[in-house]
């Protein structure tokens, strides 16, 4: 992995992050853009996706991250490994989901993950949290019927708030009212490994988009 040093937090409401990215030309990105896509929002260094992309070559993987040096390093590692089903985009997921997702073939977005998002503990910083109602509505627009959203955090109120955002949207239903004891995915993120290494709890939930 190409390791770069970066600022720990970026304020997504900062002026530098207010311009949505341009529509994506998928032509040179994936070898087969019709494969099912997993979107990881806030992928940081992208290690989770590097492992997933190798485990599931029949799927495509896309990481969105607001810290640009991490995205450059992750795409460099992806190229060095020769993975043709993986890509990372530098953007603010809160204003750039539409230009990214509207240019994909209909129905390819089948899984979304939001894992250990920045908690922004203070109430006055609540608007900086990534799971805003508008983001949930855009995911509902582009996720395939029956597609899933996996949410996990080590901060209980953050996980509860994310779940509320998805429960409020009539397109989604929660698969289980209980926190999931296990991660349903075969790969843990860096933050998950760090949390589990300290024997601290992880709160997890899966939402499904209603089939039409
Ligand atoms: C605490 S880290 C967790 C990283 C990884 N998901 C994990 O579990 O190890 C949260 C990541 O989300 C990114 N992030 C925060 N707000 C974002 C936004 N609006 N758009 C894209 N990425 C964002 C942060 O820069 C950071 O890398």
Image: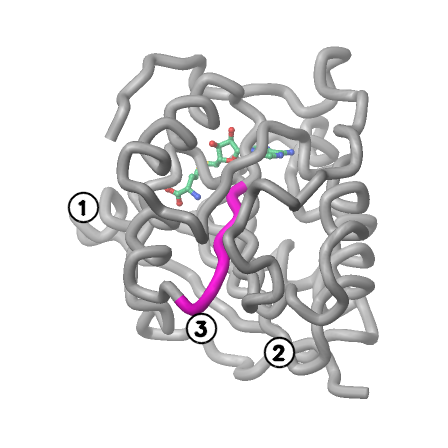
Judging by the rendered image, the residue that carries numbered circle 2 is: 174
**Residue 191 visible to an observer of this rendering:** no
User: Is 64 covered by the magenta stretch?
Assistant: no
Q: How is the image coloured?
A: one colour
**Residue 30 visible to an observer of this rendering:** yes
Quarter of the N terminus within the rendering: top left
Is disc 1 in contact with disc 3, using a CB cutoff of under 8 Å? no
- Which residue appears at 66% of the width and 45% of the height? 26
Position of residue 15 relative to residue 131, above or below, is: above
Spatial CA span between label 2 and label 1: 28 Å
- Picture coordinates of residue 209, whole percent (x, y): 70, 76
Judging by the rendered image, the residue that carries numbered circle 3 is: 179
- Which quarter of the figure has residue 6? top left
- Which residue appears at 48% of the width and 79% of the height? 178
- Which quarter of the figure has residue 201? bottom left
Question: In the rendering, which numbered label is found on residue 66?
Answer: none
Judging by the rendered image, the residue that carries numbered circle 1 is: 198
């Amino acid at each position: 992995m190409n390791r770069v040093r970066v600022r720990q937090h970026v304020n997504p409401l900062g002026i530098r992050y207010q311009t949505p990215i341009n529509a994506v030309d998928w032509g040179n990105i994936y070898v087969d853009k019709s494969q099912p896509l997993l979107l990881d929002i806030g992928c940081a260094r992208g290690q989770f996706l590097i492992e997933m992309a190798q485990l599931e070559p029949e799927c495509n993987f896309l990481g969105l991250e607001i810290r640009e040096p991490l995205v450059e390093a992750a795409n460099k590692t992806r190229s060095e490994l020769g993975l043709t089903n993986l890509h990372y985009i530098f953007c603010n997921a809160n204003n750039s989901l539409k230009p990214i997702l509207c240019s994909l073939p209909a129905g390819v977005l089948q899984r979304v993950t939001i894992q250990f998002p920045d908690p922004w503990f203070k109430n006055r910083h609540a608007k900086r949290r990534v799971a805003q109602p508008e983001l949930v509505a855009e995911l509902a627009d582009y996720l395939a019927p029956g597609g899933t959203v996996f949410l996990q955090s080590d901060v209980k109120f953050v996980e509860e708030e994310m779940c509320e955002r998805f429960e409020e949207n009539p397109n989604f239903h929660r698969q289980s009212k209980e926190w999931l004891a296990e991660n349903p995915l075969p790969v843990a993120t860096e933050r998950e490994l760090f949390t589990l290494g300290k024997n601290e709890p992880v709160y997890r939930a899966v939402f499904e988009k209603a089939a039409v």
